[in-house]
């Protein structure tokens, strides 16, 4: 028996530590994969009953903005600006919700609570 290891009996608690390290590495890999997937998931938001539509990745990066030409007139400039901002805010909220949903799937698949907050999200 190696002096200082006492009653550990072989690996003792070190086997559990190895399992924990493997689980942590697996979680890190899955989180990296999710980060990549969130960049490819597209969500849509809108305002003015669809007069302004915005698209973004689930990470919240705005990718497109569509504006119905019927709303363009000099008198309605402030209304158009408000509609654009509202559509962008809507798509960002939807992106955040989608990220939360995807994180829930990931944590659940790993046997963790669906609403567990993991770092970097």
Image (cartoon, rainbow, N blue to C red):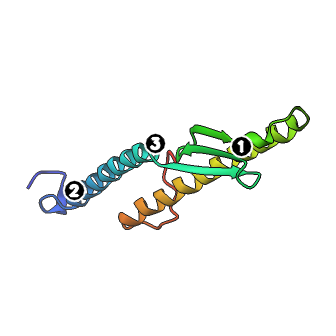
**Left or right side of 42 for 16:** left
How far is disc 1 from disc 3 in space, using C-alphas?
A: 27 Å
**Left or right side of 20 for 31:** right
Categorize mark 3 by other alpha carbons within 10 Å: few (<14), some (14-19), many (20+).
Answer: some
Among numbered discs 3 and 2, the one appearing first in the sequence: 2
Q: Is 119 in front, or is 61? A: 61
At x 41%, y 66%, the residue is: 108
Among numbered discs 2 and 1, the one appearing first in the sequence: 2
**Left or right side of 81 for 7:** left
* Spot occupied by residue 82 in the image (x, y as percentages of width and height): 81, 42
Circle 3 SS class: loop
**Picture disc at residue 59:** none
At x 80%, y 42%, the residue is: 71
In the picture, which quadrant includes the N terminus? bottom left
In the figure, 109 relative to 30: above or below?
A: below
* Spot occupied by residue 115 in the image (x, y as percentages of width and height): 52, 64
Q: Which residue is mark 2?
A: 14
* Spot occupied by residue 12 in the image (x, y as percentages of width and height): 19, 61
**Picture disc at residue 39:** 3
Q: Is 64 in front, or is 60? A: 64
Q: Residue furthest right?
A: 75
């Amino acid at each position: 028996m190696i002096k200082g290891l006492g009653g550990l009996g072989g690996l003792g608690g070190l086997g559990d530590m190895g399992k924990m390290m493997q689980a942590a590495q697996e979680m890190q890999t899955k989180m990296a994969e999710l980060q990549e997937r969130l960049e490819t998931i597209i969500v849509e938001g809108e305002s003015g009953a669809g007069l302004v539509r915005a698209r973004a990745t689930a990470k919240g990066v705005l990718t497109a903005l569509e504006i119905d030409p019927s709303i363009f007139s000099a008198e309605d400039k402030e209304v158009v600006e408000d509609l654009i901002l509202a559509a962008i805010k809507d798509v960002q909220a939807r992106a955040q919700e989608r990220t939360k949903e995807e994180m829930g799937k990931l944590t659940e698949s790993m046997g963790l609570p669906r609403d567990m907050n993991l770092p970097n999200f």
